[in-house]
Image (spheres, helix red, strand yellow):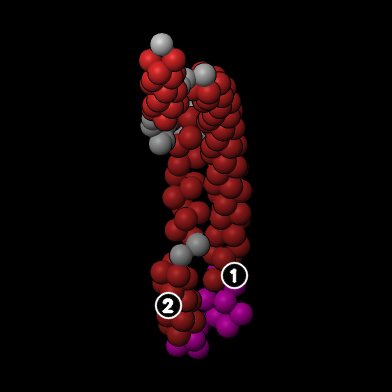
Amino acid sequence: MKVRDNALTTPGKSSGSTASQDKDFAGMLSERIALGLGTGRYLAIQTLVVIAWITVNAVAGANGLWDEYPFILLNLLFSIQAAYAAPLILLAQTRQEARDRALAERDREVNDRILSDSGFLTRELAAIHLKLENIATTTDVENLVRDLQNLAVEDDQNT
C-alpha cells in the first residue's frame, strides 16, 4: 500500500488541466515561501538586514541622501512583505487542511476495512472453535481404548 499519493500531496489536483497545474504550482510555491518565513534562519537574516538598513541609513540619512530617521522606506518594505506573507500563509494552511482531510478520509477507509476484516476473522475463529469442540482428543481416544480393553477382559472372564 502506498503511503503517499497525489491526492495527499497535491490537494485539489485534477487530471491534466493547465489551470489546475498553474493553481497547484502557485500553491506549492506559497507553501515553500510560508515554510521559509517561519524559520529561525529567515528571522535571523531579516534581523541582520534591518540592523544593516538602520545603520547605513543613520549614517547616510544624516547627509539627507537616503531613508531618514523614521525609516519610511523600511516601513513600506515591511508593509509589502506583510501584505504578501499573510495570503501566502493562508493559502499554505488551506492546502494543509485539504491534505489533512484526505488523510483523515483514507484513515477512515482503512479503519473500516480493518474492522470488516477483524469481524470476518472473529466469525471464522468462532466456527473453527465450534468444530474443534466435536473432535476427540488423544486422551479421549486412549480412555475409550482402555474402556474397550476392560470390557474385553471382563467378557473373557465371564465366558
Who is closer to the viewer here, 88 or 77? Answer: 88
Who is closer to the viewer here, 101 or 96? Answer: 101
Mark seen at residue 48: 2
Q: Going 42% across and 77% down the picture, which residue do you hit?
A: 48
Q: Is residue 68 magenta?
A: yes
Which residues fall within the magenta stretch?
Answer: 57-73
Mark 2 against mark 1, which lies toward the viewer? 2
Numbered disc total: 2
Q: Is residue 137 magenta?
A: no
> Is the N terminus in the top left, top right, bottom left or bottom right quadrant?
top left
* Helix, strand or loop for disc 1: helix
Q: Going 50% across and 62% down the picture, which residue do you hit?
A: 38
The amino acid marked with disc number 2 is: Leu
Q: Which x, y percent locates residue 151?
A: 44, 18
Q: Residue furthest top?
A: 159
Asked if residue 153 lies left or right of residue 97, the reply is left
Cα distance in 3D space between marks 2 and 1? 16 Å
The amino acid marked with disc number 1 is: Asn
In the rendered image, the vertical position of residue 70 relative to residue 30, given as above or below: below
Q: Which x, y percent locates residue 14?
A: 49, 22
Q: Which x, y percent locates residue 58?
A: 49, 86
Q: Going 54% across and 64% down the picture, which residue do you hit?
A: 77
In the rendered image, the vertical position of residue 148 relative to residue 52, given as above or below: above
Mark 2 or mark 1, earlier in chain = 2
Q: Residues within 10 Å of mark 1 (few under 14, many from 20)?
A: few
Who is closer to the viewer here, 141 or 7? Answer: 141
